[in-house]
Image (spheres, rainbow, N blue to C red):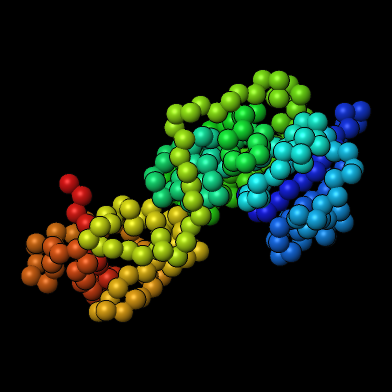
């Protein structure tokens, strides 16, 4: 999904086009959406220095990361929409795609909702679409796919906005979960605590951004590649050990085998 984006939209129903006027607000001066806006000569604003004197019909935020005050939301007749890459209330928060992969979800999706002040991702749902996650999918791949799904859904929502708002549904209280930001602390592997399946999900969730790390002979090292799960009988050879963290170099395949936590 595009990051740090807040768009103010004027909708002209008298024309074939859905959007008549678009202005872009960003938190950072170095984002892809800002560069796109500059290349296409769209009016740009740097948050929070935004002039809301112009009349817009609706706002749209994607991964914006800032709470917007109620008086700003109320300036727009249709409020402000959020394109969120999860099936809310599942994975509210800043990193839904990463936690979707990390926790082994098999189904996710995109939610178009109206934002509310004071809390993130709790507003009423205007539209939702399910997406079955392919096996071995990475967070990067999933995010790219959901971005395309979300852009299509957003245009469809804007096209039928009054109807979507009239039929909006409040989020259920059951099933809510939080997706906090990813950090380098998450990249540490503890062989005694982490199973091979967990390490696989962790690598697919954050490994392309933050190298996984572990301790080797008292020193921290980075693990740059994860080959996958190997079903090796550690008791079948004296060179292999059943102790988590035990290492064996398999010369014929040029692979380093590491014993993970045993899951019964």
Decide which of 159, 112 is in the foreground and name it.
Answer: 112
- On the image, the x and y values in percent for residue 134 come to 46, 43
Decide which of 230, 188 is in the foreground and name it.
Answer: 188
Residue occupying the point 71% across, 25% down: 165
Residue 132 appears in view: no
Q: Name the side, left or right, on which 237 lies relative to 230.
A: left
Measured along the vertical axis of the image, is residue 204 above or below residue 252?
above
Q: Name the side, left or right, on which 130 lies relative to 214.
A: right
- On the image, the x and y values in percent for residue 68 come to 70, 45
- On the image, the x and y values in percent for residue 148 come to 64, 44
| Number of disc labels | 0
Q: Name the side, left or right, on which 117 lies relative to 41.
A: left
Residue occupying the point 62% across, 46% down: 147
Residue occupying the point 81% across, 37% down: 75
Measured along the vertical axis of the image, is residue 224 above or below residue 235?
below
- On the image, the x and y values in percent for residue 121 come to 58, 39
Q: Name the side, left or right, on which 232 lies relative to 53.
A: left
Decide which of 41, 24 is in the foreground and name it.
Answer: 24
Where on the picture, by quarter, is residue 185? bottom left
Residue 180 appears in view: yes
Residue occupying the point 63% across, 51% down: 65
Where on the picture, by quarter, is residue 3? bottom right
């Amino acid at each position: 999904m595009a990051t740090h984006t807040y768009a103010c939209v004027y909708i002209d129903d008298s024309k074939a086009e859905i959007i008549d006027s678009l202005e872009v607000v960003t938190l950072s001066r170095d984002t892809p959406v800002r560069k796109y806006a500059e290349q296409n000569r769209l009016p740009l604003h740097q948050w929070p220095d935004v002039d809301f004197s112009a009349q817009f019909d609706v706002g749209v935020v994607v991964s914006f990361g800032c709470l917007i005050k109620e008086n700003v939301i109320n300036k727009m007749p249709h409020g402000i929409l959020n394109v969120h890459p999860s099936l809310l209330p599942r994975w509210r928060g800043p990193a839904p795609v990463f936690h979707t992969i990390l926790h082994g979800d098999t189904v996710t999706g995109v939610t178009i909702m109206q934002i509310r002040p004071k809390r993130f991702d709790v507003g009423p749902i205007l539209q939702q679409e399910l997406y079955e996650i392919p096996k071995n999918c990475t967070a990067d791949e999933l995010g790219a796919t959901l971005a395309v799904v979300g852009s299509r859904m957003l245009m469809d929502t804007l096209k039928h906005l009054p109807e979507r708002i009239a039929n909006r549904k409040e989020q259920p209280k059951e099933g809510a979960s939080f997706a906090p930001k990813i950090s380098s602390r998450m990249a540490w592997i503890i062989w005694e605590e982490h199973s091979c399946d967990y390490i696989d999900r962790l690598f697919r969730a954050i490994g392309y951004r933050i190298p996984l790390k572990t301790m080797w002979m008292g020193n921290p090292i980075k693990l740059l590649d994860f080959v996958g799960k190997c079903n090796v009988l550690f008791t079948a050879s004296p060179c292999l050990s059943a102790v988590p963290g035990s290492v064996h170099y398999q010369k014929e395949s040029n692979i380093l085998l590491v014993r993970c936590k045993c899951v019964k």
